[in-house]
Amino acid sequence: MDSFRNVGLMGRPGNTAVADTLLDVQCYLEAQGCRVIFDEDTAALLDRDDLQICSRTALGEACDLVIVVGGDGSLLHAARILARSNTPVLGINRGRLGFLTDVAPSEIAEKIGAVLRGDFVEEQRFLLSVDVRSGALHKSELLAVNDVILHTGKTVHMIEFELYVEGDFVYRLRSDGLIVCTPTGSTAYALSGGGPILHPRLDAIGLVPMHPHTLSSRPIVVDGNSEIKIKVLSGLPPMVSADGQPGHVLQPGDWAYIRKHPFKLRLLHPPGHDFYAACRTKLGWSSHLSSQEC
């Protein structure tokens, strides 16, 4: 438990169930001798004046471990903030699927207790950075744990763009957009678009066209260290977004450069974590197991 003396708590604002679970986690951690620190937004959710507080950007530096209460979206938000500090993150699920937040509120003592004792599985999940340029002008930079999406924005129209991987021309395509996903994001929006499921340990990036105007365009999986470039040709300005955040409008001739971010998310799972078991549970795969061993 000496490794995790200072534990940060983050939660999704505006949710009573999240607030109740945060207080349960705080009570348990303090009973184990941990110092508990809340970020400012989470502390405001609880509306108490006896909490130790710091800013979200400083939470990673102040803590040995950060526990996020909410859904996968809450953990994605935390990951984009905490990856730079190399602080491990553990998720308690108060959302729907919970691919990343895999501790149930009823398992707080059992699962968090095991993690505090050093019994856990750690995964290194890489992020993607997006650099939007217009000629020599740098327009914006975005950060994604799940995916970077070129999409039509608020209007319904097709986008025309060129795709390059490691400087090599791949294709010119007209479609509703393109999903560029990490292995973490392969079970999110990319899966709905017909993309492949990538095991979290793979060093790979998925490229999934959205409703392409051709029968031959299929998802592509490329090396995780590849530089991916998208040149916008469409007359109606599309947008590029990261993890569903508010996006950036692209003009014809703009480029989006997508590459692996230098910092990674240290994601902790309690003992017994099994990626395929999570797929069976979350995606409704058959759980029937033959009695005959392999």
Image (cartoon, rainbow, N blue to C red):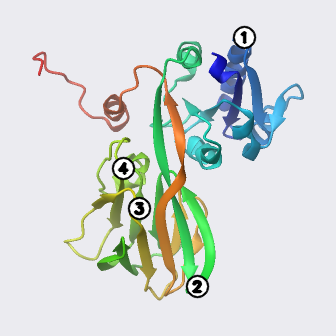
Crowd band around label 1 with a 10 angstrom C-alpha radius: few (<14), some (14–19), many (20+) = few
Which of label 3 and label 2 is nearer to you?
2
Please report the residue visible at 81 percent of the width from the left and 38 percent of the height from the top.
54
Please report the residue visible at 59 percent of the width from the left and 13 percent of the height from the top.
109
Q: Of the two numbered discs 1 and 4 on the same chain, state the one appearing first in sequence.
A: 1
Which of label 3 and label 4 is nearer to you?
4
Percent position (x, y) of residue 205?
A: 37, 56
Amino acid carrying mark 3 in the image: Val
Crowd band around label 2 with a 10 angstrom C-alpha radius: few (<14), some (14–19), many (20+) = few
Please report the residue visible at 27 percent of the width from the left and 34 percent of the height from the top.
285
Local secondary structure at mark 2 = loop
Q: Name the residue under label 4.
A: 203
Q: Residue 69 carries which label?
A: none
State how far apart marks 3 and 4 are (Cα). Answer: 14 Å
Q: Mark 2 points at which residue?
A: 136
Q: Name the residue under label 3.
A: 180
Q: Which of 151 and 223 is in front in this view?
A: 223
Crowd band around label 3 with a 10 angstrom C-alpha radius: few (<14), some (14–19), many (20+) = many
Amino acid carrying mark 4 in the image: Asp
Q: Mark 1 points at which residue?
A: 31
Q: In which quarter of the image is the C terminus?
A: top left
